[in-house]
Each structure stands twice: as C-alpha cells, then as structure tokens.
Amino acid sequence: MSRTYRVGLIVPSSNTTMETEIPAMLRAREAVLPERFTFHASRMRMQEVTKEQLAAMDRDSDRCALELSDARMDVMGYACLVAIMSMGLGYHRQSQQRLRAVAAGNGGDAPVTTSAGALVEGLQAIGARRVSIIAPYMKPLTRLVIDYLENEGIQVIDSVSLEIPDNLAVGARDPRAPAELWKRLNVQGADAIVASACVQMPSLASVPLIEQASGLPVVSSAVCTTWSLLKHLGLERRVPDAGALLSGRY
C-alpha cells in the first residue's frame, strides 16, 4: 500500500498558480509512481508585488506555518520567490529555519522549502552556473532576483521583465506564453533557462516546449519547488513532462 504525504503550501493571498501547478506535477507523478499526496494551504495577504507588501506578507508567514502544523504536514513549501529575495541575500535559509522552528514548537515538525531556495538548489543540482530568466516583475524587483542568484554563484546573463505589478494579472497569463517569450532572451553560453522566476506566473506547459526548442535544461520556480518538496520527503524526483530537473536524474 502506498503512503500518502501531506504537503503544506504557504501562499500569497492573490496567488492562483502554486495550488495549480505544484499539484498538477505531483498528480502526474502519481500516474507513474506509487506515492500519493494531499495539499493544504494557508494564505498571507498580498495584492501588489511591491517591496512594502512583500515585507508585510513575509511577516505573516509564521502564522501560516503555525496553522499548517496543526494538521501535521510532512513537508511545507513557501511560495513567493521575490518576497524572500527582497528580504536580503541568502534570506531563504533564515526563513526556512524559522518556519520549521515555528512548526516544531507546535509539535508538527516538518521540513520547509521556499521557492527562492528551491530555485537556487534546483539550478545548482543541474550544474547551471549561467542562466537566462523570464520574470513578470517590475525591473527593480527582477534586479533583486538577479543579485540574489548571483550571490549564490549563479550568473544571470540575460532577463526579460514583463513589468506587471498586479499579482492577479500575473496569474492570469497563458502558461504557454513563455514558450514564445524565451526567444527574446540571449541564451548564448547559458547552462539553463528559467521559464518563470515567479511561482505565480504560469509556465508548466512551456517547460518541455522550451527545452525541445532550445536544447537547454529549463526550470521554473514551481518546478524547482516541486523538486525540493520531493527531495525533503526523500522521494524519487521524477515527474513526466516537467523538464530535466524532474527527469529523475537529479
């Protein structure tokens, strides 16, 4: 009999994609591997992707971890990449440690990943030292992402910023749009492409299309978060049609 794992999702209140793409990947995995998953979310208020709202939202993440720990999660994922990155270089480590301590203090200890930390770890896992990225953010926030990745030893050689401040508008984008957008990137010398440096910007349908067209490994924040959740659970990191990182090789 296969085990069922509880996945806790710490989600911005206006995010509509994390609870779509991450379950979609793990449901696809259920078609080929025995483990099963249930999904449980707690939300932090955030409507516009500004530094002020991101900081206020991050302060709310402790409450979310506490709430989820009441239901005894097996793993938790914090899904707002730029919220973590806007709090300072390397902040994902501090956030993950603090949220795990909050859960443990309530008797519900569970490993915690953040989409920011997962993107770093996922790119490192495939050996990507030079990347090109697509982001929905205003250019100053994209710059934060670039600085954060470069502080972790990952050079960003080019980026596309869609400059959409409204988080609902980001989530309403066509998941196949990145399959065209990537053509605006300079990928000369890149080791990988980040199809969406934002868990809210849909891109799962584009990941295999960009890989096929570019010949490069392609990840997204959601793909990397799924990879990290599986890693923390000690499970095989394999999901059909989700790109190289989730091929089972890493």
Image (spheres, rainbow, N blue to C red):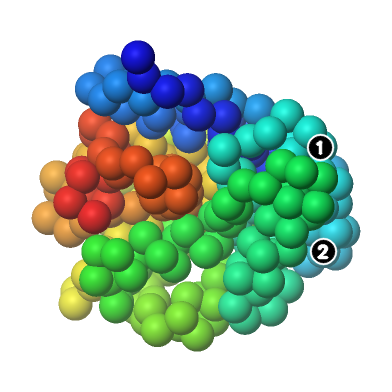
Quadrant of residue 243 in the image?
A: top left
Left/right placement of residue 211 relative to residue 237 reads left
Q: Residue 17's image quarter?
A: top right
The image quadrant of residue 39 is top right
Looking at the image, is 227 positioned above or below residue 28?
below
Which residue type carries mark 2?
A: Ala
Q: Is residue 64 above or below residue 127?
A: above
- Spatial CA span between label 2 and label 1: 20 Å
Which residue is pictured at 74% across the width and 36% down the height?
A: 68
Taking depth in this image into account, of 47 and 247 the one nearest to the observer is: 247
- Number of the label disc, if any, that sits on residue 58: none
Image coordinates of residue 5 in percent, x first then y, are 50, 29
| Residue 67 numbered tag | 1
Q: Furthest residue to the top?
A: 1
Query: Which image quarter holds the C terminus?
Result: bottom left
| Quarter the N terminus occupies | top left
First in sequence, mark 2 or 1: give its number. 2
Tally the numbered discs: 2
Measured as percent of width and height from the top left, residue 190 is found at: 23, 72
- Between disc 2 and disc 1, the foreground one is 1
Helix, strand or loop at label 1? It is helix
The vertical placement of 138 against 38, above or below, is below
Q: Which residue position holds label 2?
A: 55
Does the image show residue 216?
yes
Asked whether 152 or 36 is in front, the reply is: 36
At label 1, which amino acid type do we have?
A: Glu
> Is 92 drawn above or below residue 39 in the view shown?
below
Which residue does the image show at 14% across and 45% down from the upper left?
A: 212
CB within 8 Å, label 2 to label 1: no
> Which residue is rendered at x = 80% and y = 52% of the image?
105
